[in-house]
Amino acid sequence: MAESGRKRGVYAQLALGAAERGRFSPREIIDRLGRAADIVRPDGLVFWPSGDAALDGLVRGRCRELGLDLYLWLPVLADAGFDPAERDLAENAWGGGPAGGSGAWARLGSGDETFRFACPFAEGQAGRIRARCRDELPGYDGVFLDRIRYPSPANGLENLFTCFCPRCLERTPALAAWRDNARGLRERLRSATDVDLGRWGTFQALLAAFGLPEFAAARSLVLAEAVAGPARLARGMGKLVALDLFTPSLAALVGQDFRLLGGLADWIKPMIYCRARGPSGLPLELACFARGLLEWGRFSGPEVMAFVARSFSLPAVPRSADELESGGVDLAFAAAEYAAARGSAAVPIHPGFECVRHPDFDLDPDGDGIRRCLAAFSAAPAVVLAWNILYTPDDFLRIVAEGRPPPSRLFTKTRS
Ligand SMILES: [Zn+2]
């Protein structure tokens, strides 16, 4: 795919939630696709359908006319077009979950997406995902699996310690001891000070100190097994498989192992979001993580921020969680994250970056930021313009289009 002389590919994303259907007419949506194709000539579109058969059919038809590879954007463990059944929800070490807790995002559950995660072993959820694949995938070239993870810091710090539901305890007996360890860790943090935090050094070392490193590895195996179900089903239908993963420095927090998951996919999109103030974006996730720690222990803000910077190898120590959330992470970090993803999975890595002016996430990057992201990903065979082409201004598309090959080279299917 990345043979010498070939310029990088481009994938766009289109999500049609209730907000978009209120803001844009079907005509505007279709015109936007044509306009994007005129300017940037994407190779493919990742499409989160609206559920309105007529509108979704129009979008798919237009993509066919434009020669785009079309991927069904399928959230697996949360926001799959239905809320998971109560009995299917993931459970944390304190019997609660999966959304809400220490440091949780204040807007969690207020929009179209609830981020209420199912247990990866929940058969009810898996059955509904299989049904969506069988019903919808025939109209697509591939599937793009999203929400293939455990809850993140935006769901509250307690929810990093999931899943301990009866299903999981039965399948993995070692979980009972790990649940005790997680409870012990939190109890110890209640009386911990800055000196203790400095001694532990990083979150990874803290987990190790409380007997939890095997817990992290076991979760990654469970998750890979859960992702294998829909991935194999799609492959069996002759479809491409792409995965939407957290950026490498955050992936372990949510149970994602690039090496394990890469074996299931044709390509991976790490969400290298240095600016986004929403779930999966570094600024919000790390700010929620810091706030959760501040709630758990008797720590000072600066010591927690130093701990966060060490744990996630940030290029600088943010002054506060608020500053981190509003100011973001230096874009220099993006190149290191891409290199880490590339080094840990044997499939093509197509980094995703915020290429939107999104009204719901106070996201307003400038052209210089877009250029810096593209430069950070100059070795990538393709990039993904996250996360909704409806909010991508033409001037951003023109920047992405600089150096793109002429149209005749473009509409080459990536299937081998
Ligand atoms: Zn479970």
Image (spheres, rainbow, N blue to C red):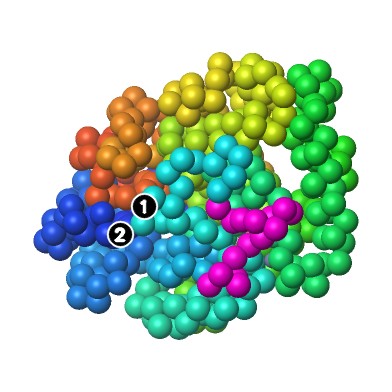
Other-residue count near label 2 (Cα within 10 Å), few / some / many at <14 / 14–19 / ≥20: some
Marked residue nearer the N-terminal end (2 or 1): 2
All told, the count of numbered labels is: 2
Q: In this orientation, which residue lies closer to the viewer: 192 or 23?
A: 192
SS under mark 1: loop
Other-residue count near label 1 (Cα within 10 Å), few / some / many at <14 / 14–19 / ≥20: few
Q: Whereabouts is ligand 1, in terms of quadrant? A: bottom right
Is any atom of residue 86 visible in this view? Answer: yes
Type of amino acid under label 2: Gly
Q: Mark 2 points at which residue?
A: 17
Residue under the point 62% across and 78% down: 123
Is residue 89 on the magenta stretch? yes
Is any atom of residue 12 visible in this view? Answer: no
In terms of secondary structure, what is the magenta stretch mainly? loop
User: For the magenta stretch, what is the residue range?
Assistant: 85-99
Q: In this orientation, which residue lies closer to the viewer: 66 or 353?
A: 353
Is residue 377 on the magenta stretch? no
The x and y percentages for residue 297 are 72, 29
Residue under the point 43% across and 26% down: 326
Type of amino acid under label 1: Gly
Residue under the point 64% across and 16% down: 302
From mark 2 to mark 1, how far is it between C-alphas? 10 Å
Whether ligand 1 has any atom under 8 Å from the Cβ at mark 2 is answered as no
Q: Are marks 2 and 1 in contact (CB under 8 Å)?
A: yes
From this view, report whether residue 179 is shown above or below residue 211. below
Q: In which quarter of the image is residue 79?
A: bottom left
The x and y percentages for residue 67 are 27, 65
Residue under the point 61% across and 40% down: 102
- Left or right: residue 74 versus residue 157 is left
- Left or right: residue 286 versus residue 303 is left
Q: Mark 1 points at which residue?
A: 111
